[in-house]
Image: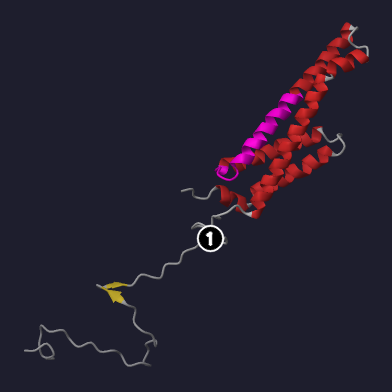
Amino acid sequence: MSFGDPNNPYGQPPQQQPAPGYGYPQQTPPQQGYGYPAAPPVQQSYGDYPGGYPGGAPAEMPGITRAARIMLAVLAVVHVILAGFYGYALSQWDQTMADAGISNDSETQQFADLGKGVIVFMLGLAAVFAVLGLVLLLQYAKGGNGIRVCSIVYGSFAIVTGIFTIAAYGLGLIVLAVAILLIVFAAKRPTAEWFRRPRY
């Protein structure tokens, strides 16, 4: 008995290919290894960003995220300016009240002290917002999604600042516009992908 003998019951039967054109498609059979079909080709998705991470996360800060960072910087600078303005007003408060003749009357002095307290409160609030804005600004390059959420909340509070300063030579309108732009830019998908990117 030989391997090629067709009458050998233990030998491997000869394999015949079906004739082409009789119900079988004209294609080559898939490559198989050890009885298993070959794996399909792997397709890696790197998103819309060149040099990005798997899943579409950008490797460098998108333009819209940079715009949000600029808006945040503008709002932080505005709060620094407001803190300086309130500090100057506080330093001149007693002299202004003395020039107006209010310091001699006890009843009007109470209102003057109330006004001074309001200025102290506004100074502290502007200083806190300036510091928060600068901290958020410095975290844009390496921070997580919490920085993006805090930027949106910061922009929402900056709208209130814009409403309070709307009478200050149009400064309030600028603050309102910049705060709205910050919220919009920080809420966009590329910004969210930037802050959710994997960090190694």
Q: The N terminus is located in which quarter?
A: bottom left
- For the residue pair 163 and 131, the one nearer the viewer reads as 131
Q: Secondary structure at mark 1?
A: loop
Question: Is 155 placed above or below 21 here?
Answer: above
Q: Which residue is mark 1?
A: 51
Q: Position of residue 189 (x, y in %)?
A: 61, 53
Position above or below: 70 against 158: below
x and y, in percent, of residue 147 in the image:
59, 41
Residue name at image x 64 percent, y 50 percent: 65
Q: Is residue 64 left or right of residue 177?
A: left
* Residue 165 image-quadrant placement: top right
Residue 69 appears left or right of 114: left
Magenta range: 122-145
Lateral position of residue 165 relative to residue 182, left or right: right
Question: How would you rate the neighbour count of disc 1 (Cα within 10 Å): few for under 14, some for 14-19, many for 20 or more?
Answer: few
When the figure is inspected, residue 133 is found, relative to residue 92, above or below; the finding is below
- The spot of residue 177 in percent (x, y) is 78, 44
Residue 137 falls within the magenta-colored stretch: yes
Q: Residue at x 90, y 7 (%)?
A: 105
